[in-house]
Each structure stands twice: as C-alpha cells, then as structure tokens.
Image (tube, helix red, strand yellow):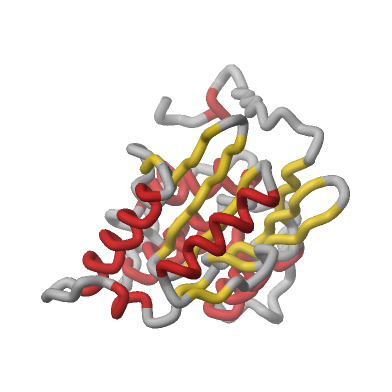
Amino acid sequence: MDVHNAFLHGDLDEEAPRCWFSKLIAALIQFVFVQSYPDYSLFTYFKHNVRLHVLIYVDDLIVGGNNTVAIMKFKEYLSRCFHMKDLGPLKYFLGIEVAHGPDGIYLSQRKYALDIISECGLLGAKPASVPIEQNHHLALAKGALMHNPNQYRRLVGRLIYLTITRPELCYCVHILAQFMHSPRQEHWEAALRVVRYMKAYSGQGIVLRSDSDLRLYAYCDSDWASCPLS
C-alpha cells in the first residue's frame, strides 16, 4: 500500500518524517499491532490464530498475513485513517522483484543487478563462470592502492545488498568487504569478476516454497576455505 502525501498526515513540526512515522505507529497500535524490537519498521498482529505483519518503508507498506478477511479489514481501517492506495499483490519493493506462483514466492534483483553491470561498464564484457577464484590470495595482495577507493566501497556496498537474493555471492562479497579501508587493484579486479559473474546469471534469485518449513541449513568446510589468515 502507498500513502499519498505521507508527511502531511503527521502533526507537523521541524521533523516531518518523524511526525508521519509517529502517527502511523499510533494507528497501528490502535489496531493492536506490536512493534518489533529488532526491526522498528516491522509490526505484528496476533489474535485468535490470525497473524498479520506490516513492514514500513517511509510511505510504502507491505501487508501480509494468514487470513484474507482480516487483511482486507485492516486495509479498510488504514484507508479511513490516511489517504492510501492499494497497489495490489506485491511485485517490487526496494529493488527486490517478487513473483508469485503455485510453488511459492520467487525473489530476485535482476533490474538491480543489471544496473550494477551497466554502472561498471561491463554490459559487453565476457561473463565469468564463477564469482571468485578458488585459490585466491586477495588477503596477501601487494598491488597499487586504488586512486578512488570510494568507487570500490560503493560497488561492494551494492553487492552486499544483492546478497539478499543471491546467497551464493555471500562468501566472495564477505572477502571483498575486508578491504574497504585500503582497496588495491587486485581487490577491484576481483570485485569486477563478481559483476561479470552476475552478467551470466542476472535473473537468478531464491524461491520461498509454500511447502517449506523455512529452516536454514549452513555448512562450512573444515579449513575455512583455505583462508591464509584464519
């Protein structure tokens, strides 16, 4: 759902965004929602086996739950409190594309990935088959320091956000993030390799299956991926 002229709904003072958020919180609490302590933008309603969740980003709200009737009643309540527009089933949120199917929900960041590839000038580059060399020695790099380290930091920061739907990139992005302070040429080339890998698999994402218990399984190799520093 999208709120029209969100800041004007608040009782305005010098901090209009804060006023709007405070007024929205008051409306949610009135509906007996509880604010999450780990994530202040997440609110949960649980009553009589009905569970609703609301995730807020400024004036955009994601509403979900296990009861369609309860969701509709809550949306009607919000529309009475504020001038809002229901945008329908979630398709795109903060760079994340959402597709619904009979097997579950598919999340990807294809457009976001293509923006990174374009920004790096690699739309015509040859794709890489793997995101990082197996026996890399990035921790021991001795090459020249980058003249513009902010360029490296920006790229790695964008790659970190991409790992939301690309868990196979977590390891290599974790390695690249270790050199934010003083990136060298080898680190920049390794970051570009990740971008070239993305070019081959820009539409890849994750599936949240409807029959899954959403358990997370993690594995680690016994020598910590042959890291020379650990």
How many numbered marks are there? Answer: 0
* Residue farthest left in this picture: 14
Q: From this viewpoint, is residue 223 visible? A: yes
Please name whichever residue, 123 or 227, is drawn nearer the observer in this view of the structure. Answer: 123
Q: Residue at x 50, y 57 (%)?
A: 161
Compared to residue 66, the image places residue 58 above or below, namely below
* Residue farthest right in this picture: 102
Compared to residue 213, the image places residue 80 above or below, namely below
Q: Position of residue 151 (x, y in %)?
A: 38, 71
Please name whichever residue, 3 or 112, is drawn nearer the observer in this view of the structure. Answer: 3
- Tell me the quarter of the picture where residue 35 sits: top left
Q: Residue at x 56, y 44 (%)?
A: 52
Q: Position of residue 177 (x, y in %)?
A: 41, 49
Q: Residue at x 47, y 44 (%)?
A: 175
Q: Position of residue 126 (x, y in %)?
A: 73, 71
- Tell me the quarter of the picture where residue 81 sits: bottom left
Quarter containing the N terminus = bottom right
Quarter containing the C terminus = top left
Q: From this viewpoint, is residue 198 visible? A: no
Please name whichever residue, 31 or 93, is drawn nearer the observer in this view of the structure. Answer: 31
In the picture provided, is 165 more to the left or to the right than 179? right
Q: Residue at x 63, y 58 (%)?
A: 72
Q: Position of residue 191 (x, y in %)?
A: 52, 60
Compared to residue 48, the image places residue 57 above or below, namely below
* Residue farthest top in this picture: 222
